[in-house]
Image (tube, helix red, strand yellow):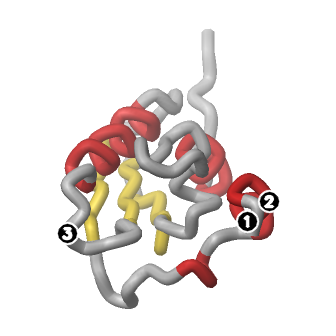
Amino acid sequence: MSTVSSITKERVLQQLRDVYDPEIPVNVVDLGLIYNVDVEEGNRVRVLMTLTAPGCGMGPYIAQQAEWAIAELEGVEGVDVEMVYDPPWNPDMITEEGKKILGL
């Protein structure tokens, strides 16, 4: 009998490290695009994320990739990825790891 792994914010963020903006070689977590992760009752995951620019045409693609990545976690029963633009993204949101990759 297998037990369902518990879904945590940390596990979701780790999974999102496999999702990239196709134009930037840094994952969405280290790029600072993930604003919030909530694991709700029933193992539903809700993510608030943004883009480097509100008009970015890759937004739907990146959101879909994020949703699919989270859905792959064992035990996840539902995923809601919402794009928000407040506060606006800025380069200060990039993690130290992301800055290293970008040479900043």
**In which quarter of the view is residue 84 placed?**
bottom left
The earlier-in-sequence mark between 3 and 1 is 3
Secondary structure at badge 2 equals helix
In the rendered image, residue 47, in percent from the top left (x then y), is placed at: 39, 61
Between the residue at mark 3 and the residue at mark 1, the CA separation in whole angstroms equals 23 Å
In the rendered image, residue 48, in percent from the top left (x then y), is placed at: 37, 68
Secondary structure at badge 3 equals loop
Which kind of residue does numbered mark 2 sit on? Lys
Residue count near mark 3 (Cα–Cα under 10 Å), binned few <14, some 14–19, many ≥20: few
In percent of the image, x 29 and y 80: which residue is there? 85
Residue that protrudes farthest toward the top in the picture: 1
Residue count near mark 1 (Cα–Cα under 10 Å), binned few <14, some 14–19, many ≥20: some
The earlier-in-sequence mark between 2 and 3 is 3
Q: Quadrant of the C terminus?
A: bottom right
Which kind of residue does numbered mark 1 sit on? Lys
Which kind of residue does numbered mark 3 sit on? Gly
| Residue identified by numbered label 1 | 99
Q: Where 41 sits versus 83, above or below?
A: above
In the rendered image, residue 12, in percent from the top left (x then y), is placed at: 56, 48
| Residue identified by numbered label 3 | 55
Q: Is residue 46 visible?
A: yes
In the image, 43 versus 23, the foreground residue is: 23
Between the residue at mark 2 and the residue at mark 1, the CA separation in whole angstroms equals 4 Å
| Residue identified by numbered label 2 | 100
- Asked if labels 1 and 2 touch by Cβ distance under 8 angstroms, the answer is yes
